[in-house]
Image (cartoon, rainbow, N blue to C red):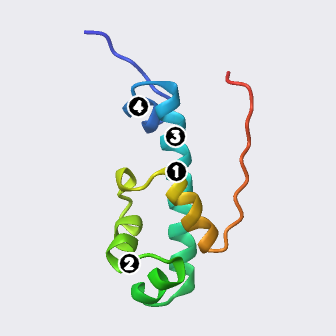
Amino acid sequence: MKSEVSSNVWDALADNEQEAANLKARSALMHAVRKAVESWDIPQAEAAQRLGMTRPRLNDLLRGKLAKFSLDALVNIATAARLRIEIKVRKAA
């Protein structure tokens, strides 16, 4: 049995580098949106309305259900939360 060591959980879970990069980006966006929503200190129904989504969908986001959100959807949600998105690209190690 061969043992592998990964630098983070997404590298360990993903089947390839592209999938790991997508998971990392989605996770970062989801975390940022969650922090923003929690800082508003308003009921979930109001936060969901502000983001243009249903309360159950917002609940999925706040509970970290990453598989339910595409990168595109999270970019749109982050924009609705008035977050500015910056993408940094650098050469892989």
The residue tagged with tag 2: helix, strand or loop?
loop
Earlier residue among tags 2 and 4: 4
- Percent across and percent down for residue 23 are 48, 42
Residue behind mark 3: 22
Earlier residue among tags 1 and 3: 3
Q: Nearer the viewer, mark 2 or mark 4?
A: 2
Residue behind mark 1: 71
Q: Amino acid at mark 4?
A: Ala
Tell me the crowding category of disc 4: few under 14, some 14 to 19, or many 20 or more residues within 10 angstroms, Cα based: some
Residue that protrudes farthest toward the top in the picture: 1
Disc 4 to disc 3: CB gap under 8 Å: no
Q: Nearer the viewer, mark 2 or mark 3?
A: 2
Query: Marks 2 and 4, Cα distance to the nearest angstrom?
Result: 29 Å
Tell me if 30 is positioned left or right of 15 in this view.
right
Tell me the crowding category of disc 1: few under 14, some 14 to 19, or many 20 or more residues within 10 angstroms, Cα based: some
Q: Which mark is residue 59?
A: none
The residue tagged with tag 4: helix, strand or loop?
loop
Judging depth in this view, the residue of 51 and 91 nearest the camera is 51
- Percent across and percent down for residue 61 are 41, 65
Query: Marks 4 and 3, Cα distance to the nearest angstrom?
Result: 9 Å
Earlier residue among tags 2 and 3: 3
- Percent across and percent down for residue 58 are 40, 73
Query: Marks 2 and 3, Cα distance to the nearest angstrom?
Result: 24 Å
Tell me the crowding category of disc 3: few under 14, some 14 to 19, or many 20 or more residues within 10 angstroms, Cα based: some
Disc 1 to disc 3: CB gap under 8 Å: yes
Judging depth in this view, the residue of 39 and 50 nearest the camera is 50
Q: Which mark is residue 54?
A: 2
Residue drawn at (40%, 87%) of the image: 45
Residue behind mark 4: 14
Q: Quadrant of residue 88?
A: top right
